[in-house]
Image (cartoon, helix red, strand yellow):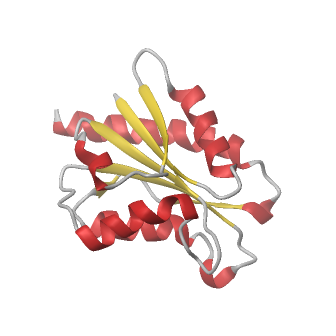
Amino acid sequence: MKINILVGTMTGTAQMCAQEMELALDGDEVQVVTLLMDKLDAGVFADREATYLICTSTYGQGDVPDNAKALYEALCSGKPDLAGVRYGIFGLGDRTYAETYNFGGKRFDEILASLGAERIGERYTNDASSGTLPEEIAVEWARAWVDKVRERLAQTA
């Protein structure tokens, strides 16, 4: 199984979560590649053998992080056909910003689904104000998510 983690981050927390997920998941059965979204375009989704994990924070007024804007805008304007793409979302946010809580992950989820990609599992929304360490939750969530990916891949085999 191949997983490509795409990271949208401003302060590095999403990148730290992605690195911890990669360390926990990468092994004999699972190959993990982590890529910062900087300078990525819709072509990053060309590998239909991979399953994609979007690990992104939310910034400003519910925006995607600066390093994710080009990819997000390319998906919105180019509207590529992403049928056959499988993905998951690990979103980071802060519930004290209730009106825009976790919108970075939500925005990627909505655009990927509208372009025909298939989300595996529920969109995870980590709350920075909860007092838990997001990287620890990320590893636990990612292991359960990979099990769901395995189930989905077994259905299509």
Question: Residue reaching furthest bottom?
Answer: 99
Q: Quadrant of residue 149?
A: top left
* Quadrant position of the C terminus in the picture: top left
Residue 154 placement (x, y as % from top left):
24, 33
Query: In this orientation, which residue lies closer to the viewer: 60 or 132?
Result: 60
Up/down of 149 relative to 109, above or below: above
Q: Residue at x 34, y 41 (%)?
A: 51
Question: Residue reaching furthest front?
Answer: 39
Q: Residue at x 60, y 61 (%)?
A: 57
Up/down of 109 relative to 137, above or below: below
Up/down of 146 relative to 98, above or below: above
| Image label count | 0
* Quadrant position of the N terminus in the picture: top left
Q: Quadrant of residue 125?
A: bottom right
Q: Residue at x 61, y 55 (%)?
A: 9
- Left or right: residue 132 versus residue 41 is right
Residue 20 placement (x, y as % from top left):
63, 34
- Left or right: residue 8 versus residue 129 is left
Residue 23 placement (x, y as % from top left):
59, 27
Up/down of 44 relative to 83, above or below: above
Residue 76 placement (x, y as % from top left):
32, 72
Question: Residue reaching furthest right?
Answer: 131
Q: Quadrant of residue 102?
A: bottom right
